[in-house]
Image (spheres, rainbow, N blue to C red):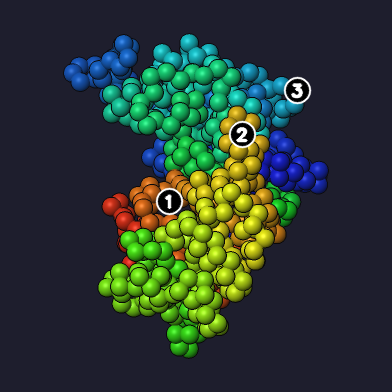
Amino acid sequence: MTELVTAAQMRAIEQAAIESGDVTGLELMERAGQGVVEAIFEEWPELDTEVPDAPAASGEGGAAPAAQGRPPRDISGPKKQRAVVLCGPGNNGGDGFVVARLLKAKGWEVSVWELAAPGEGAPDAAICRQAWLEAGGAISTWDEIEPLGAPDLLVDAVFGTGLTRPIPVALANMFRLFRDRWHAEANWDDRIMRQVAVDIPSGLSSDTGWALRPDEDPRENLPDGWPDFMDWVFPTDLTVTFHNAKLGHFLRAGGTLSRKLRIKPLHGLGVFDASGGLPVSVEGHVRLIEPVFHGREVPGYLHFSFLEKHLGHKFDHGHALVMSGPPGQGGAARLAARGALRIGAGLVTVGCPLRAVTEHAVQLTAIMVKGLDGTHGLGEILEDKRITGLCLGPGLGLGPATADLVRIALEAKRGTVLDADALSRFQRKPDVLFDMLHDNCVLTPHGGEFARLFPDLAERLDAQENTGTYSKVDATREAAKRAGCVVLFKGADTVIAAPDGRCSINAAVGERAVPWLATAGAGDVLAGMITGLLARGFDAMSAAETVAWLHVEAARSFGPGLIAEDLPEELPKVFRALGL
């Protein structure tokens, strides 16, 4: 899996490499700038051309209509590509000066704007700035850059991964001006302004994904539904980071602000691992869930071949029991049961009050229905040791019986998923639930349910908007330790943590975004799928990680228009694509 690191972990990796004597900070900066330029041309090969100066246009059709009150632009004949590079006073700005110098060497017209000259803490950046000036470059003011109009490429190298404070409001206003004016002008001229961030979009915390609010609020006349952070953090078409992706690339606004992320190794400098990157060993890192095929590592430490069925009979693949609530509330349980069956559980039963049997029986065929007389009935059916996975919560109700059913289920020590009502029922006394949980349980809260069970953690998380020091990863890790079991904190940036500190992120952002997954019942299917894998013998962390990834892949496979019932039925297509 891809390892995700914090800003402090990345600094420690770089510092260890520098202290080894085999590489200098300046070499790392040069390689980073080169990596950005490489990534730009890999993403947009059409930009990797050197166009000679074009003669002035004459005759008809040589000018485009004026935009934003400017004189008409000459768009006839070939022209040089133009870039604007925004540089900050730290090492991120130093990377930007390298990018500017390399683009200029390829024949680009490059304008550089700097927030401030590199300070005493950034000597390598100062050297790169001087190299830019010695190469014939200049530092331009905004008043000199703005009249030139929208560039072909805008590079954000203002603030990097170490930002923990709000950006200046003047910079936020510049970002808004770029977005509003230059995009409008580019569209008017039927051109594209490509936006690139070095390491991470400026204004975004690389540890938490929070968009750090400016020191003054620049918002005014925002469109309905427009995320307010879009008004001061500059969204990008491409973000180029180095060695490891950072937590903030996938958490909260991080996945929204960059349409594509590329990770460039800082290789060839003497102290690197076999893959060409800096040393990988980072204690306490977070893993990004992603598949690697053909027998190599896949989500949850397992090969997808474990999902296959080569030998044995149905009981060799587990029996999942999904508990349902009173009549009229059984749809969620049926969705969960279908998810458990499609993920490969050998048998699946819906357990329900006797008066709800008919409702389920007329809608289920491959899934069995068992009428249960409350907690006594659940205790009786759990005497069958072949039931290896339990799911409680979807449509179970919030009455006193729910707490009793959860207690009986947990006493059986089977693989257990608690979701929805099984979580909310304990919101007044969450410690009562925590005392009953065991290490083969998975809790699957969304934001509201998380806040009910862990109100102090949720409050601390929401209070971090302008400090960027406490992340969803931190909150989920603390929750898992407190609960003593795996916690899957749902969202586009789903975070999964185990009590021992293991943690992973399943990011449905950027190219992997599936906004149509925000539909009623999708979480019920997720809970059922995890239950199916627990029933099949997966450990709790592996089951949660594997299902989180498959859940998104099923939604991607189906596409817009998805409803919850489609998710289980899409799994066979996903499995075939995996070669199962």
Disc 2 and disc 3: Cα gap in Å?
29 Å
Amino acid type assigned to the residue bearing label 1 in the image: Arg
Coordinates of residue 557 in the picture (x, y in percent): 35, 59
Which of pointers 2 and 3 indicates the residue nearer the eye? 2
Disc 2 and disc 1: Cα gap in Å?
27 Å
Which of pointers 1 and 3 indicates the residue nearer the eye? 1
Coordinates of residue 304 in the picture (x, y in percent): 50, 71
Q: Is residue 201 above or below residue 337?
A: above
Disc 1 and disc 3: Cα gap in Å?
41 Å
Amino acid type assigned to the residue bearing label 3 in the image: Glu
For the N terminus, the quadrant is bottom right
In the rendered image, which residue does mark 3 sit on?
120
In the rendered image, which residue does mark 1 sit on?
512
Q: Is residue 89 above or below residue 541?
A: above
In the rendered image, which residue does mark 2 sit on?
464
Coordinates of residue 377 in the picture (x, y in percent): 49, 76
How crowded is the residue under tag 1: few (<14 C-alpha within 10 Å), some, or many (20+)?
some
Coordinates of residue 113 in the picture (x, y in percent): 54, 19
Q: Is residue 400 above or below residue 104?
A: below
Residue 345 figure quarter: bottom left
Q: Are marks 1 and 3 in contact (CB under 8 Å)?
A: no
- Residue closest to the eye, 449 or 303: 449
- Residue closest to the eye, 507 or 486: 486
Please tell me the numbered disc located at residue 63. Answer: none
Pointer 1 or 3: first along the chain: 3
- Residue closest to the eye, 387 or 264: 387
Is residue 62 in view? yes
Q: Is residue 164 left or right of residue 249?
A: right
Q: Is residue 323 left or right of residue 427?
A: left
Q: Is residue 399 above or below residue 144?
A: below
| Residue at the far bottom in the pictured view | 312
